[in-house]
Amino acid sequence: MAARVEGLFVYPVKGMTPQPLTHVDLTAGCGVPFDRTIALARPGGAYEPGLGHGISKREFFVLVAEARLAGLSTHLEPTSGVYTVDVRGHRVLTADLGTDGGLAELRSFYARVLDLPPGIEPVVAREPGRRFTDTAHGSDRAMEFVSFVNLGSVRDFAARVGHDVDPLRFRGNVHLEGLPAWSEFDLVDREFTLGGVRFRGTQRTVRCAATEVEPGTGKRDLPVPRLLSTTYGHEFMGFYAEVLDGGTLHDGAELTVGAPVG
């Protein structure tokens, strides 16, 4: 069976629900459109409006520390800016993030969810041309990397630790099917194509406490980094790649691997 894409996802708001895609138009040197272009920053932290460089993910409200966020089902319509939140199938927020009123509703809602002190609210971080990816603190180039997860590796990990592991724990943009477990690491420092889009693998993805949280429930139920370390001797799952030649990436696109780079 040829290795192929089996899942495409965008995360418009950092730390919130993945939104599945059937296809995505990619541009050389750029990440998935609308991916992590909004974040909820910690008040009084390193983020200030006009920020022109990447900062640590710990400056934002994310699953590393706020597991309860995974219990919310969120959706952002990128073109309209309408953001919704559901809890157990019930709509609890509809906010137009293109308006001051909508932004105020968003801040007030998350202040309650996060049990912030009275008068304290998250800061809505949005900067033209910037993404709040985990790699953004490295460089502007790394900020635009696309994240990949090999479903074969996820299954191998689940079998070894004796626990169901939802690949959405790893919050990748692209899920790959048909690769042997852990062979995705061979794509680092290699060029490869998916359909008509050409990539270069850049680095393995080190996993943090965010992966301990079960998607959809907000329960911190599996010590993923520790289990990766004790099982395999590393804390990697997945890898990053940069887009070299753009195009439309479709679910089901087949993988072709080129020669090692350099």
Image (cartoon, helix red, strand yellow):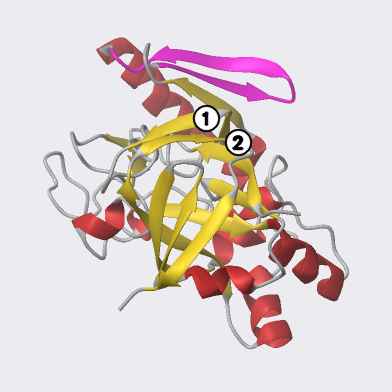
- Binning the other alpha carbons within 10 Å of mark 2 as few (below 14), some (14 to 19) or many (20 upward) gives many
Query: Is 100 displayed left or right of 149 in the figure?
Result: left
Q: Amino acid at mark 1?
A: His
Q: Which mark is residue 251?
A: 2
- Binning the other alpha carbons within 10 Å of mark 1 as few (below 14), some (14 to 19) or many (20 upward) gives some
Q: Earlier in the sequence, mark 1 or mark 2?
A: 1
Q: Amino acid at mark 2?
A: Asp
Q: Residue at x 63, y 72 (%)?
A: 183
Query: Is 182 displayed left or right of 240 in the figure?
Result: right
Q: Position of residue 257 (x, y in %)?
A: 51, 63
In this rendered view, identify the residue nearer to me: 231 or 108.
Answer: 231
Q: Secondary structure at mark 2?
A: loop
* Viewport quadrant of the C terminus: bottom left
**Which residue matches tag 1?**
23
Q: Position of residue 203 (x, y in %)?
A: 41, 70
Q: Position of residue 66 (x, y in %)?
A: 53, 50
| 95 in magenta | yes
Q: Residue at x 63, y 88 (%)?
A: 233
Is any atom of residue 174 visible in this view? Answer: yes
Q: Measure the alpha-carbon separation of dots 1 and 2.
A: 6 Å
Q: Secondary structure at mark 1?
A: strand
| 162 in magenta | no
Q: Is the stretch drawn in magenta largely helix, strand or loop? A: strand
Q: Which residues are magenta?
A: 82-98
